[in-house]
Image (cartoon, rainbow, N blue to C red):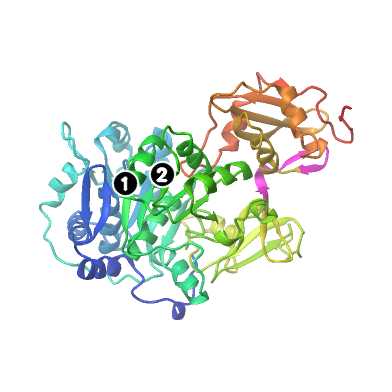
Amino acid sequence: MTTIETDSLRAEWTLTSTSAVHARDRGGHPAILCEDRSVTYARLHRDSDRIAHGLLDAGAARGTRVAYLGRESEYYYMTVIGCAKAGAVLVPVNWRLTGGEIDHILRDSDASVLFVDEEFSAVVDRLRPELPGLRTVVRTDLPGEDDPGAGLRAWWSRAPYADLDPGTGPDDAVVQIYTSGTTGRPKGAVVPHRGFFTLPAAQRAAGVDWIDWHPEDVSLISLPGLGTAGIGWFMHGFNAGLTNVVMRLFLAQEAVRLIREHRVTTTFAAPAMLQMMLDERGADRAAFTSFRKIAYGGAPITESLLARCIDVFGCEFAQIYASTETVSVAVCLPPEDHRPGSALLRSAGRVCPGNELKIIDTEGRSLGPGEIGQVCVKAPSNMLGYWNLPDATRETLVDGWLLMGDAGYVDEQGYLFLCDRINDTIIVAGQNIYPAEVEKALGEHPAVADAAVVGLPHPDWGEAVHACVVPRAGTTRPTPRELLLFLRGRLADYKIPTAFHFSDALERNPAGKVLRRAVRERLGGGAQPAPAAARPGTDTRHD
């Protein structure tokens, strides 16, 4: 585990103290709106205190891992803050995972308490006999109750109500988020309190407001709170004292309704989610007049989609580059750089105030402008390390620098341009091909809604470029030849896919990132070859 110099941190940068301050100063202000329920900051503080007392009664001590398996609701965030007040560490479990994956997280984290929705209790009942360390299971809801918190309230009713101070500081662990597992078994990234506080403070000190939260804002939590994208966006809003509109499950039609009804002013979403909202019936400019700023990230965005977003949403946009391990935003393309036709739209942006950025080669040497290597970030929000994985922590956190696993370069002006994940790079006859570049070019085709590009084994070239394409609804499915001709002139010939697969959807994690490993495993048969497919060292252009 690593820490940073606490001289630069403020002692009150904990969820515990923030909850108490808001209860005192903004007690009557809505903290969370979920479905038809409203929770004020005073109630959020009181009920999270009750959860904390319940945890202590259940034997949870400082550092105890407490798991949560359920959909997002006000009760999920009450539990996060309740864990903080007990000094425990919340371990969110993605309810979309298989039983084996859930078992891995519960076993790896050594969780002694588990909160679970009735909807997912069957899998816990099957796993529990093999998890002797899991001493307490709390049903957040009860059979037959149309209320996601009925069971939780029944459990905490035995606990007294009183404020708690576990003595934790900004460097102490508060959440343990498991990575998406795109490069192997999920690892538990241990998140400190400071991860949710340093970015706004650094921006204020630098006099910029690239991504900001204000007490009068209404923020839509559209990404799952089970990952750092969702919980991070919520916590930044919670720390600012604004109103968070929480969705139990993202549905584009419902998101548009909530934006209109609650006059949402800000949100963070993956590009695919923005596109789904724009494609909804009734999603016109009038539906989004309340927005002042939208942050997006988690996957590349095409220039055509961004132009459409800017036109219809009619607000400022900021692009976020981050990871589970950075906890907060590492790099941002600020609103002033979102100019139509600007080459900067192809960049991830500039390093955020308070952070540092560098590119290194395979030997760990720093590279100069324009040289492609691995992206590294040093940020006060970075994780403490991976739970019980000292070797993996040392490989990822080197002298305070977090190795992001992405290939990219920095230009002369300090803008970061991403090429792709280091592990996703396709090597065709010695030529490096970055899937994101090909995917972005495919995404500009008017009949392509989504695309994933992967490398599959080839007897002569080592790997061949394969594209999995999701056709856009309401259009005629493009043929491989049409896509091939479309890509010519946009990409070097050796980067053009040799085969195209068509699918109704792509495998994505909850943060919206394409799971290329899953796509790669699914492909291998049924592809339609591209005519006169590009081959290394050949020119396949036709007059």
Expressed as whole percent of the image width and height from the top left, the position of residue 301 reads 59, 45
Q: Which of 236 and 169 lies nearest the eye of the viewer?
A: 236
Residue 406 seen anywhere in this rendered image of the structure: yes
Q: Residue at x 18, y 56 (%)?
A: 47
Q: Residue at x 74, y 31 (%)?
A: 486
- First to last magenta residue range: 418-432
Residue 497 seen anywhere in this rendered image of the structure: no
Expressed as whole percent of the image width and height from the top left, the position of residue 310 reads 54, 49
Residue 286, numbered label: 2
Task: Residue 476: say if magenta.
Answer: no
Residue 272, numbered label: none
Residue, disc 1: 68
Q: Amino acid at mark 1?
A: Tyr
Task: Residue 431: say if magenta.
Answer: yes
Lateral position of residue 480 relative to residue 207, left or right: right
Lateral position of residue 174 relative to residue 1, left or right: left
